[in-house]
Image: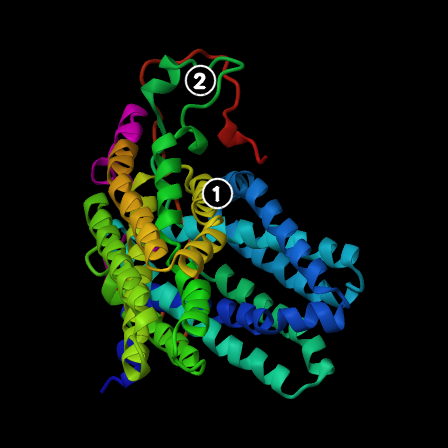
């Protein structure tokens, strides 16, 4: 008989193996993040202002190099980028013991952040490539749930080091994180190689002169303006995290009579829902239409949460507590549905030969769409009260409406490039080894064992060029690593 735990795990063995990996890497990161403020101030010896500046500079570096690192993931290979980037993360975490000043700490944090950015591009592109279309979002929901669980356990481990009030333990946390991340890199190396899409030279490339020197590649991700806009709007819709982590806690403390201990209850509810319900929220999401439906549901949850939280300013006692809890539940629903919708849109609207580059644009656009929210939402809610909450809701409603034409324009952009919808492509987006039609091969290895890459022999494919391009051709932006 299956155990209660096994019922929560995916039946597909590849998804299960990747879920274990997701939990492992998140556990390592969560252990350090919990105590990073203490580590930076008490071990490295930085002031709070220096910590803030260091984090800002590292995020700026990630923003600037997001797309180049995505291109590098395509050039090197998404799986290999994930492996090498994870190993580099482990090396840089182990290097924290060398940091003893602002300059040396910055010299560790910036390359660590860039390695993490490279990992994200490779990992996101790999997860899209390795699963068939109908399973992608469902599988990523399992991986997201596993990451949330891993972060929670990692936070407990980091909190234990802080609770023991020993700087020796705090000093050892980055080394512990490094060891776990090395194990994570090895685990990723046991995953199968993703299938390769059939290469296509779109007719529009020649029409726009992409083969001529000095002309930009029309297939470059940043030239896909509808996709860039879509990722920006996804970032706006993803500002539910600002409500969860910043605005609602501040509102509860300053504008309601609810006891502060309620915050622990709210965070616990969010964690449980994120682990237990993410897969259910992603069920049935595969196409652009499905993804937009999920985005609408997420936006509706966001709007309901704004309305509920706004009225708690005038309630008292248990009514306030219950309403705050319901408001937190609904904004968590926004998180679950919006995440599923985003995965589906990115998978469907990205050039299949440039998924790493497109993942870099996802990070770029998402950050642009959300970086302003902490300051703006906090000011609106805390200074304008109910009117401010109405403005926040209006922002979300506008983004939810605008993302529909942006996504459809993204579909038309791919068609203009000669890239047909995936159902019409000649790709085989299933895990390596699943082509023989056997159930065991499709599922991966036996439970509890890593997924071993199987020997691959790629069929020879002809490049379709319509019309025929000139013999002399400069490399496209895709050929550069940035």
Q: Is residue 133 left or right of residue 382?
A: left
The residue tagged 1 is 364
Label for residue 224? Answer: none
159 to 389, vertically: above or below:
below
Q: Is residue 463 left or right of residue 93?
A: left
Asked if residue 463 lies in the magenta stretch, the reply is no
Given residues 382 and 107, the one toward you in this image is 382
Q: Which one is earlier in the sequence, the residue at label 2 or at label 1?
A: 2
For label 2, the SS is loop
The answer, for residue 9, to whether it is visible in the render is: no
Question: In which image quadrant can residue 170 be found?
Answer: bottom right
The magenta stretch spans which residues? Answer: 412-438
Asked if residue 432 lies in the magenta stretch, the reply is yes
Q: Give the percent coordinates (x, y) of residue 433.
A: 34, 55
Q: Which quarter of the rendered picture does the C terminus lie within?
A: top right
258 to 308, vertically: above or below:
below
Given residues 453 and 92, the one toward you in this image is 92
């Amino acid at each position: 008989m299956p155990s209660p735990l096994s019922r929560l795990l995916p039946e597909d063995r590849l998804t299960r193996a990747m879920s274990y990996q997701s939990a492992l890497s998140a556990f390592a990161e969560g252990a350090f993040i919990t105590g990073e403020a203490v580590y930076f101030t008490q071990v490295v010896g930085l002031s709070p202002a220096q910590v803030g500046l260091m984090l800002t500079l590292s995020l700026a570096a990630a923003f600037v190099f997001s797309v180049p690192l995505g291109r590098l993931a395509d050039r090197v290979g998404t799986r290999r980028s994930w492996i090498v980037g994870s190993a580099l993360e482990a090396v840089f975490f182990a290097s924290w013991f060398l940091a003893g000043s602002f300059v040396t700490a910055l010299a560790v944090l910036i390359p660590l952040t860039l390695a993490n950015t490279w990992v994200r591009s490779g990992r996101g592109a790999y997860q899209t490539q390795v699963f068939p279309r109908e399973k992608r979002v469902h599988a990523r929901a399992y991986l997201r749930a596993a990451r949330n669980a891993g972060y929670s356990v990692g936070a407990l481990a980091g909190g234990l080091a802080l609770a023991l009030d020993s700087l020796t333990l705090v000093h050892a946390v980055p080394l512990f994180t490094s060891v776990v991340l090395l194990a994570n890199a090895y685990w990723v190396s046991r995953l199968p190689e993703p299938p390769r899409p059939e290469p296509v030279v779109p007719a529009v490339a020649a029409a726009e002169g992409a083969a001529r020197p000095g002309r930009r590649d029309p297939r470059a991700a940043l030239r896909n303006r509808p996709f860039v806009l879509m990722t920006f709007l996804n970032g706006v819709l993803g500002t539910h995290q600002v409500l969860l982590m910043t605005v609602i806690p501040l509102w509860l403390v300053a504008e309601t009579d609810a006891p502060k201990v309620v915050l622990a209850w709210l965070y616990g509810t969010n964690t449980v829902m994120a682990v237990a319900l993410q897969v259910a929220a992603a069920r049935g999401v595969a196409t652009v239409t499905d993804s937009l439906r999920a985005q609408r549901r997420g936006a509706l949850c966001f709007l309901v949460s704004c309305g509920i939280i706004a009225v708690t300013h005038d309630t008292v006692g248990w009514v306030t507590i219950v309403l705050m809890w319901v408001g937190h539940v609904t904004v968590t629903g926004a998180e679950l549905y919006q995440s599923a919708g985003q995965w589906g849109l990115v998978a469907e609207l990205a050039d299949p030969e440039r998924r790493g580059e497109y993942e870099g644009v996802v990070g770029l656009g998402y950050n642009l769409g959300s970086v302003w929210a902490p300051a703006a939402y906090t000011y609106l809610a805390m200074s304008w009260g109910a009117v401010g909450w109405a403005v926040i809701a209006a922002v979300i409603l506008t983004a939810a409406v605008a993302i529909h034409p942006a996504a459809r324009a993204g579909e038309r952009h791919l068609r203009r490039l000669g890239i047909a919808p995936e159902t019409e492509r000649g790709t085989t987006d299933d895990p390596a080894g699943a082509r023989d039609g056997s159930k065991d091969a499709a599922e991966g290895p036996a439970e509890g064992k890593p997924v071993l890459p199987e020997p691959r022999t790629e069929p020879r494919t002809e490049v379709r060029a319509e019309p025929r391009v000139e013999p002399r051709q400069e490399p496209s932006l895709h050929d550069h690593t940035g």
